[in-house]
């Protein structure tokens, strides 16, 4: 019995020794495979801290081990961990088959999973985005305004439709389809959401061209109003004006002819101008009338061209190029020549327009600084100082605006000085400050204006805190007529605020300070693209810098009326960023003490979408004048200054 037990113990010890030997052999073989792979020569001595890391391929090690340990009979199960890499090797041998599983560190496994998930999520996101964009285009084709607006909702965040996405078949955007389909409502919404108005299709055609081809007159008008480029040429080098002449639509052609930027000399692939494609005699007569109109304004164009030459000379790059060719003295001479040309044309232009002095014109009366007694400074305009002066021969009081030539030229303000002088000298209206004289000396330009002793509405508001609705009604009626007259001359004021509305000796309101005004703007919604004006008096479209037209003046009229009634501008904040945000996003707060008519007017004028704003349509000021707020106003009496405001 004892012998049997001893035999079993010996057998058990023998088996344990064999398992230990098998395990050691596996370990030796495992690390041997690493050394075989890590060192190019087998059995080479590897330093404990090698100068270069050993590159280990776990999968190759497993293949080597599977070949090596198929000869062992005993069952084995254990784990080895590589502390350098953190990889775990799980060994299991059963029925002469060795199975090794590799487990990477948790962090590495998470990275692999995240990488796989991120790649999948990104692909899914783009697929969904493409589907949304395609739905948006399909709904714009079908004139489904409600669905289009749902897909453009900001609440969808990055899953909202891209408003300028293009159809892969023809390169059309939603604006192309709505223009082609004569969908005026959808176009208004798309423009409000800042659709690219001159987006090009695969045939290089704009939405304006498609609406012209379809003879959708209202669409053409609103696209031009919104600032569409009418001189873009398509794959056949035709412009929208070419297509209007091909259609022979007189109303369309008249719309294009009213655009100051129209280039009617562009030719298509066949070498034909737009007018060459038109056989209608009435249309040709309209064109010749347009040419006569251009000829009558030739002097004005010359002034603008001279202004551009002045600006070009004072651009840094051009001066540097000139310096390489001519001396500094020659540069100064050339600049002086341009300045004298500008002044000469300026004087000729004013002589041709009218005798702007009630006593005599420029050629009959010599006017200079010695003609006036200067009493003192009474204010500052956008780009100059204003002094109270008295004309020595008749004791008449005037306001003298002084502009420094060096400041104008060095700061590239020539266009602002020209703009103010051009507007004031050519405009004659009872509610716009009149330019009486203009002259210059070696370093200054002088504008002599009618003096308004009543101060401005800003000062009046500071004194009174708030004005009565009747006062605001009377002042705003006069401002409406002034803006209406400017708009009839294709001028937008752009800088309407209480400080720029002065009061004459009878208390009537007059517009002044035209440094920021814009000439030659035929569009009501968008047209001018510079960022200007006092911060609190900026319209939403001016903040977006997406172009603004005559409609901006009606927004600013709303701001002025609001401030006169309430005491502060709408959306006001001392923080500039918060103010900008409020103008574009905040809800308009209307105090309870305002009448229903004034509340209605303010909502209509302070409409953020310039297309929907009161006064943005073809009626311009007529839309304002027809509002119930002005129902008690006799507009003829206002124009004749029969309403007494003192």
Image: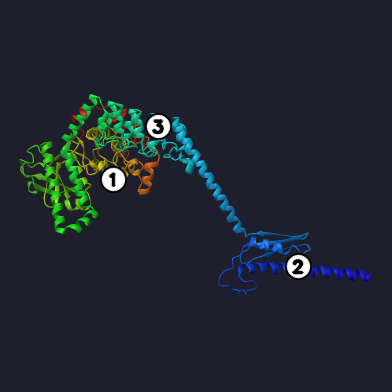
Mark 2 element type: helix
- Of callouts 1 and 2, the N-terminal one: 2
Nearer-the-camera pick, 164 or 30:
30
Number of labels in the image equals 3
Q: Name the residue under label 1.
A: 532
Residue 51 appears left or right of 284: right
Q: Is residue 323 above or below residue 603?
A: below
Where disc 1 sits, the SS reads loop
**Residue reaching furthest to the front:** 270
Tell me the crowding category of disc 2: few under 14, some 14 to 19, or many 20 or more residues within 10 angstroms, Cα based.
some
Give the percent coordinates (x, y) of residue 537.
30, 42
Q: Of marks 3 and 2, which one's residue comes earlier in the chain?
A: 2
At x 60% / y 55%, what residue is drawn? 110
Labelled pair 3, 2 in contact (Cβ < 8 Å): no
* Image quadrant in which the C terminus is located: top left
Q: How far apart are marks 3 and 1 (CA)?
A: 33 Å
Q: Which of 77 and 265 is in front in this view?
A: 265
The alpha-carbon separation of the residues under discs 3 and 2 comes to 81 Å
Residue 362 found in image quarter: top left
Question: Whole-percent x and y of residue 131?
Answer: 50, 39
Q: Where is residue 70 in the image (x, y as percent from the top left)?
A: 74, 62
Q: Mark 2 points at which residue?
A: 22
According to the image, label 3 marks what residue? 178
Q: Which circle, 3 or 1, is nearer the viewer?
A: 3
Mark 3 or mark 1: which comes first in sequence?
Answer: 3
- Depicted 86 relative to depicted 266: above or below: below
Residues at marks 1 and 2 touching, judged by CB atoms closer than 8 Å: no
Q: In which quarter of the image is the N terminus?
A: bottom right
């Amino acid at each position: 019995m004892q012998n049997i037990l001893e035999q079993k113990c010996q057998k058990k010890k023998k088996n344990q020794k064999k398992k230990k030997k098998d395990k050691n052999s596996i370990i030796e073989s495992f690390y041997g495979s690493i050394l075989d792979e890590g060192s190019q020569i087998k059995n080479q001595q590897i330093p404990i801290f090698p100068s270069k890391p050993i590159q280990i391929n776990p999968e190759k090690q497993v293949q080597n081990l599977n070949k090596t340990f198929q000869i062992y009979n005993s069952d084995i199960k254990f784990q080895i961990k590589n502390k350098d890499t953190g990889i775990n090797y799980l060994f299991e041998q059963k029925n002469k088959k060795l199975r090794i599983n590799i487990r990477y560190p948790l962090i590495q496994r998470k990275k692999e999973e995240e990488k796989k998930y991120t790649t999948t999520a990104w692909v899914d996101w783009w697929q969904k985005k493409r589907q949304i964009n395609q739905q948006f285009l399909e709904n714009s084709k079908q004139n489904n305004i409600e669905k289009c607006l749902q897909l453009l909702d900001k609440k969808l965040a990055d899953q909202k439709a891209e408003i300028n996405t293009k159809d892969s078949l023809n390169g059309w955007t939603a604006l192309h389809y709505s223009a082609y389909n004569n969908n005026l409502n959808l176009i208004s919404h798309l423009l409000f959401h800042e659709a690219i108005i001159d987006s090009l299709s695969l045939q290089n055609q704009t939405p304006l061209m498609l609406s012209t081809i379809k003879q959708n007159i209202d669409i053409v008008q609103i696209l031009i109003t919104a600032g569409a480029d009418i001189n873009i040429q398509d794959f056949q080098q035709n412009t929208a004006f070419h297509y209007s002449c091909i259609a022979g639509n007189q109303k369309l052609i008249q719309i294009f002819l009213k655009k100051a930027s129209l280039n009617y000399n562009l030719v298509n692939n066949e070498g034909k101008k737009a007018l060459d494609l038109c056989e209608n005699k009435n249309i040709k007569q309209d064109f010749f009338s347009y040419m006569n109109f251009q000829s009558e304004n030739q002097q004005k164009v010359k002034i603008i061209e001279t202004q551009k030459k002045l600006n070009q000379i004072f651009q840094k790059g051009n001066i540097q190029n000139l310096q390489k060719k001519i001396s500094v003295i020659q540069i100064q001479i050339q600049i002086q020549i341009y300045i004298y040309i500008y002044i000469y044309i300026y004087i000729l232009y004013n002589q041709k327009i009218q005798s702007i002095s009630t006593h005599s014109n420029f050629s009959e009366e010599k006017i200079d600084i010695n003609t006036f007694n200067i009493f003192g400074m009474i204010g500052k305009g956008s780009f100059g100082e204003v002094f109270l002066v008295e004309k020595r021969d008749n004791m008449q009081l005037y306001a003298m605006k002084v502009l420094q030539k060096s400041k104008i030229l060095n700061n590239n303000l020539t266009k602002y000085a020209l703009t103010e002088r051009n507007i004031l000298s050519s405009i004659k209206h009872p509610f716009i400050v009149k330019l009486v004289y203009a002259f210059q000396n070696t370093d200054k330009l002088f504008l002599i204006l009618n003096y308004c002793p009543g101060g401005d509405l800003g000062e009046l508001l500071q004194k009174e805190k708030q004005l009565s609705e009747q006062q605001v009604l009377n002042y705003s009626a006069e401002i409406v007529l002034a803006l209406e007259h400017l708009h009839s001359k294709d001028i937008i004021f752009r800088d309407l605020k209480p400080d720029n509305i002065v009061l004459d000796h009878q208390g009537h309101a007059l517009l002044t300070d035209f440094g920021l005004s814009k000439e030659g703007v035929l569009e009501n919604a968008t047209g001018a693209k510079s960022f200007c004006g006092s911060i609190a008096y900026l319209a939403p479209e001016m903040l977006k810098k997406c172009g603004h037209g005559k409609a901006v003046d009606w927004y600013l009229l709303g701001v002025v009326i609001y401030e006169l009634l309430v005491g502060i501008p709408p959306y006001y904040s001392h923080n500039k960023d918060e103010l900008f945000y409020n103008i574009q996003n905040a809800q308009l707060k209307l105090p309870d003490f305002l009448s229903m008519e004034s509340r209605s007017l303010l909502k209509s004028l302070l409409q953020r979408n310039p297309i929907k704003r009161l006064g943005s349509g073809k009626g311009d000021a007529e839309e304002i004048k027809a509002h119930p707020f002005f129902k008690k106003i006799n507009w003829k009496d206002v124009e004749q200054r029969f309403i007494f405001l003192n």
